[in-house]
Amino acid sequence: MESVGEVRHTVAEVLERLVGQMSHYRPDSDLGRFNRARGAQWVNLPVEMFHVLDTALSVALETEGAFDPTLGHLVNSWGFGPNGPTGTPPDAQAVLDGLFRRGWSRLLLDPARGRAWQPGGVSVDFSSIAKGFAVDQVARVLDDFGIANFLVEIGGELRSRGVKSGGHPWWVAIEQPPDCEGFPEVVVALCGQAVATSGDYRRYFMHDGVRYSHTIDPRTGKPVRGDLASVTVIHDQCILADAYSTALLVLGEAAGHLFAEKRQLPALFIARDGNGFRHSCTRAFQDMLD
Ligand code: AMP
Ligand code: MG
């Protein structure tokens, strides 16, 4: 039988490894190395980072670029990256520059040799997907130790296995925007699935009465507008719940619903409506409530 200390130690080791690979904030991470690579070249990647990039590029393709892991320069210009907050919108030139430098479709993967093509100057940012992947990896460690019942959470993204003590399912209250009080809690029973929420209230700044949130619309180079305050997605893999929740927030209410319904994805949308909020969800999400 494993000791709690042994499990804790292995989990800490895995998390440290992932941060060392994929942190946007650590210049010495493998991601930092990829982003700083001078000129066009192949860059060798650790296995886990290769997988995250591969998944991110698949979601980018599937969402026609609404999800884009190459917005690093724009994210920084808007004050949501490693350079820290700016508190004001960047000038038009900086936005244009960021738009030119993004480009998920210019990255290539060479699975046989575990390397990725850096076309030069592209800044990869995994902030919308790496937390979900980390949750999956911690769940995997617990599985490997033979632990049958757990709920793993990192920064609001969760993954479950088995049941709670007493044989009850893992009832999870879905995160709601902070100013949403009064709205009934939405609670789902997770049976082995993961849940992730993306919201415009998580990181944002106000300027001239406008809310600028950390989710960037790659078509405009600016924070998403539209009514959505948050999107929650449930999926077997937390990496995909995380990526899809960000993607649906960018797609917006109408296109996001269509995308999720087509894939039978359980998704909950919370939109700002006058001074209040309105909720809507896909059929697959509704089925989880019944
Ligand atoms: P999340 O909280 O998972 O929705 O991730 C938000 C973070 O992802 C932001 O802080 C940015 O670093 C990054 N990001 C912003 N816009 C996008 C986008 N359109 N696609 C992918 N990542 C993005
Ligand atoms: Mg995300």
Image (cartoon, helix red, strand yellow):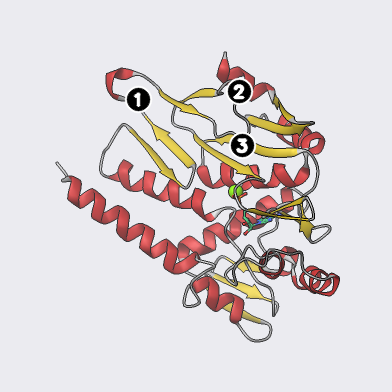
> Of the residues tagged 2 and 3, which is closer to the observer?
2
Observer-nearest of 96 and 283: 96
Q: How many residues crowd mark 3 within 10 Å: few (<14), some (14–19), many (20+)?
A: some
Residue 196 location in percent, x, y? 55, 40
Q: Which residue of the protein is positioned furthest toward the bottom in this rendering?
A: 38
Residues packed near mark 1 inside 10 Å, few (<14), some (14 to 19) or many (20 plus): some
Instruction: Look at label 1 and name its amino acid.
Output: Val
Residue where numbered disc 2 is placed: 182
Say few, some or many: other residues with alpha carbon within 10 Å of mark 2 (under 14 / 14 to 19 / 20 or more). Answer: few
Q: Residue 177 carries which label?
A: 3
- Furthest-top residue in this view: 290
Residue drawn at (36%, 63%) of the image:
16
Query: In terms of sequence position, does the residue under pointer 3 or pointer 1 come before the other?
Result: 1
Q: Is residue 83 above or below residue 196?
A: below
Instruction: Please name whichever residue, 56 or 76, is drawn nearer the observer in this view of the structure.
Output: 76
Task: Please determine whether, in this image, residue 28 is positioned above or below residue 225.
Answer: below
Of badges 2 and 1, nearer the viewer stands: 2
Quick check: is the Cβ at mark 3 less than 8 Å away from ligand 1? no
Q: Position of residue 20 (x, y in %)?
A: 42, 68
Q: Whole-Å distance between the Cαs marked 2 and 3?
A: 11 Å
Say which residue appears at 80% left-offset and 31% top-offset: 274
Query: Where does label 1 land, which residue?
Result: 163
Quadrant where the image shows the N terminus: top left
Q: Calculate the distance from the C-alpha at mark 2 to the C-alpha at mark 1.
A: 29 Å
What amino acid is labelled 2 in the image?
Answer: Gly
Helix, strand or loop for disc 1? loop
**Left or right: where 173 falls relative to 41:** left
Mark 2 and 3 residues: CB-CB less than 8 Å, in contact?
A: no
Labelled disc at residue 64: none
